Each structure stands twice: as structure tokens, then as C-alpha cells.
Amino acid sequence: MTRKEALNSVKANVENENLIKHMLATEAIMRALARRFGEDEEEWGLTGLLHDIDMELSEGDMATHSKLGADLVREMGASEAMAHAILCHNEAHGIPLETKLDKALFCADPLTGLIIATALVRPDKKLAGVEAKSLRKKFKEKSFAAGANREQISQCSKIGIELDDFLQLGLEAMQGIAANLGL
Ligand SMILES: [Fe+2]
């Protein structure tokens, strides 16, 4: 599966522009993590890009979300490792995170929302001016972007990256694709 095929498939299955941007942002963080750990950047990146492809198909039903997605990406030719990471990123199924890829997707997913919210409270609403220290501050403010699950983000320690380092890596990764995110 090429990136182009993956992106076309995302666009064919998802209408919500913000959801597509969330998947692009997750892809960027997953690529940065793969580079950091010397993992397969395409595999990790495409896992991020595809992870919520079934969100509209499953109509947000957490009992089917990510099961449909895992089946869909398998049909598209994704590896079993990719399908597994996508399947277990939805905690509702209670499927344990096993591989480093599973764990990376799990902690990268909520980080995008925290970073976007941090950019949006700036007067210029741009990612470029967000500093790692303001992101760290927003992380600690539990009521800020409360949907961005802090405990889940903190699980980055399980793949061997400390929280502050992870926040910075995520920020830089998303700044690198700011134009695609409209931020
Ligand atoms: Fe997601």
C-alpha cells in the first residue's frame, strides 16, 4: 500500500475535514517516533494515517470503531501489525497493547488534540509559535482540552520516551506539516 492509496482511502471514507487533519497529525507524530526508534517509518506513518478511517462508517459507535477499521486496512493490504495497532487503539475492546507500534499509536492519538488546542488559544492560531514549554504547561492544566487524555499520552514512557521529550517531538512533527493542518 502506498501513502497515496492510503490517503485516497481515508478521503473516500471520511468527510469531516478535522478528522482527516487529526489522522494527518497522528501520521506525522508516528513518523517522527519511527525515526527516533529506527522503526519502519512507512508502516508507522500509515498506521497513524489510517487509524480512524472507520470513524464515520462506525458512526462513532465505540463497540465497532477500530474493528471495522482493522478489517478495512487488512483488505487494503496493510500488515497484520498495522491492523492490530489500529484494532487495539480503541480501549473499548479491552485488547491489550502488545507491540511497540500498538503502544506508539495509543499515546500519539490523543497528543494531536492537545497540540491543536494549544495552537488555537494563541492570538495567531498558528502552530509555528507554540513553544514546548507552553505545551508542557497546557498538559498540566487538566481542564484544558480535557478530551486529550493525559494518562494515555503519558504512556509514551512505555515505548521508552519521556513525557517532555514526547511533547516536543509531537509538536515539532506537527509544526512540520502545519500548512496541511491549516494551522
Ligand atoms: Fe484518533
Image (tube, rainbow, N blue to C red):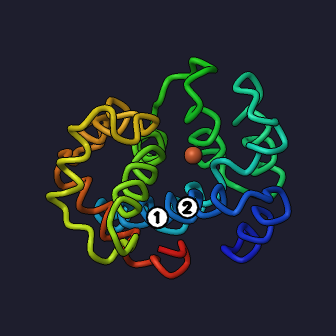
Label 2 Cα crowd, 10 Å radius (few <14 / some 14-19 / many 20+): many
Residue 128 pos. (x, y %): 32, 77
Q: With 4 as the anchor, is 109 left or right in this view?
A: left
Location of residue 8 with respect to 37 vertically, above or below: below
Q: How many marks?
A: 2
Q: Residue at x 40, y 68 (%)?
A: 174
Give residue 43's mark.
2
Location of residue 124 with respect to 159 vertically, above or below: below
Query: To which residue does mark 1 refer?
Result: 40
Location of residue 12 with respect to 145 vertically, above or below: below
Q: Amino acid at mark 2?
A: Glu
Quadrant of the image occupied by residue 90: top right
Furthest-top residue in view? 94
Q: Amino acid at mark 1?
A: Asp
Quadrant of the image occupied by residue 42: bottom right
Q: With 99 as the anchor, is 164 left or right in this view?
A: left
